[in-house]
Amino acid sequence: MSKQQNIIVWLIGICIMFIVMVAPSVVFAQQEKVNSSYGPTNQTETFDQIKAERMAVKNARAKEHMELLSSRYDLSKKTSTDILMSGGKPIPVGPTAKLIGVTWEQLNKMTPEQIKEKGLFPYKPLPFADHREGGMLFPEMITKSLPRLVRFDLDFDLPEWILPDPVPAIYLTTRPDLGDVAKGRLITINNYYEIFNGILNPKQLEGLRLLVTQFPQQQFNATEDRRTDRPDGMLGVTCFDCHANGNTNGANHLVGDIRPQEFRHRIETPSLRGVNIQRLFGSQRALKTVEDFTEFEQRAAYFDGDQCMASKKGINILERGSQVHFMAEFLALLDFPPASKLNIYGKLDQKRATPSELRGEALFNGKAQCASCHPAPYYTDNSMHDLKAERFYKQELANWMMMAHDGPIKTFPLRGIKDTPPYMHDGRCFTLEDIVEYFNLVQQLDLKSEEKKDLVAFLRQL
């Protein structure tokens, strides 16, 4: 072989080496730019590699998120012992939202355009603790009792004083004479039978068993891309891990039905109390029965709405005619907490209510227009409404979440509302005072300070 041929062979070899070394990074860079609906179902990294990557960014992203929360809210503890949640926990008091250079009174006088232009709206959409990552996230007050729900890569972001009671009361429509059936006990697979055997019929008892049975979920499963250290039989989540005792514990996640990632909404866990009088389920998608919602959760929501991931991680296909039916039959028994000041029409008893509460009820049904969507006795119209809150803030990225529109949102029942902070579908309003301020701005009601206090006083009695 001539010297010239040797040089050619050498150059070809160099080119091949360059392609082998560089091409994968080029392909990877190109893949990163692809905005796909699907996640990486066929992982090429090991669990240890994935965990190391997540842990490397954990502290920085937690700091970034806490800075956002601190810039928006006063997180110092403020509670009231005058009225307690039905489980005994003091209710949080606000408003907690921070205003920048204006008072609430001044803000009430401004137009949506003025508030938007000056960036003064205090209740913008709330990002997830790590919006790029998402998944189910449980408060520490729950993971203390259920350590299998600890994620190695994320810590819960909201302070415990604004969350529901960690062990909510349970009231049954079939046995109101029993009062709180839970009596300070968190219902799990370990105690459900001894507590409810003899109170429920066999179908209802089996439905409850399924509600406290662990099934694989996107972050809690046996695959290499899980977000828990436990590769054993403790993996999985139950319905009651989020809906503690049929109520809620403040656990949150990202909706599974929106893409790309930055447009996905943070979702707070709603209470399951009173599902027997509801006709819509899901904050936005308007599922028509609780049976539909039960199947939707197991088949799709548990896996970020990705059926490919569901197949990989261990989807639990519930049998509609028995298992789903049994679960729904128990759920229909979960009652709202007693409200001693409400009469049989769901309105205030004139002889029991205070003057402030009565004024609040009049505002609720009148000037504040709350009853337009939240009529008595259950304080829901079983419909959906779009408040168009995006009139008040610019569409921009904040901690990797796009501050975009909310769209139509289900009208949640207000019965027992003092038991279920934080409020709104994404938890952006931490207290009832914040809720009143939010709707006062969005509906442009121009409520006075005393009127807001009266409204809160009424809401606490529902």
Image: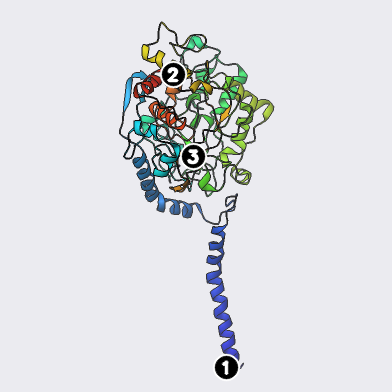
Residue type, label 1? Lys
Q: Is residue 379 above or below residue 9?
A: above
Q: Quadrant of the N terminus?
A: bottom right
Q: Quadrant of the C terminus?
A: top left
Q: Is residue 176 above or below residue 19?
A: above
User: Is tag 3's residue or tag 1's residue first in the polypeptide sequence?
Assistant: 1
The circle drawn on residue 390 is 3
Q: Residue at x 32, y 22 (%)?
A: 80
Measure the alpha-carbon separation of dots 2 and 3.
Answer: 26 Å
Residue occupied by mark 2: 363
User: Is tag 1's residue or tag 2's residue first in the polypeptide sequence?
Assistant: 1
Name the secondary structure under disc 3. helix
Residue 353 drawn at (x, y percent):
40, 10
Disc number lying in front (1 or 2): 2
Residues at badges 2 and 3 in contact (C-beta under 8 Å)?
Answer: no
Residue 96 shows in this picture: no
The image quarter in which residue 13 lies: bottom right
Disc 3: CA contacts within 10 A as few (<14), some (14-19) or many (>=20): some
The circle drawn on residue 3 is 1
Disc 2: CA contacts within 10 A as few (<14), some (14-19) or many (>=20): many
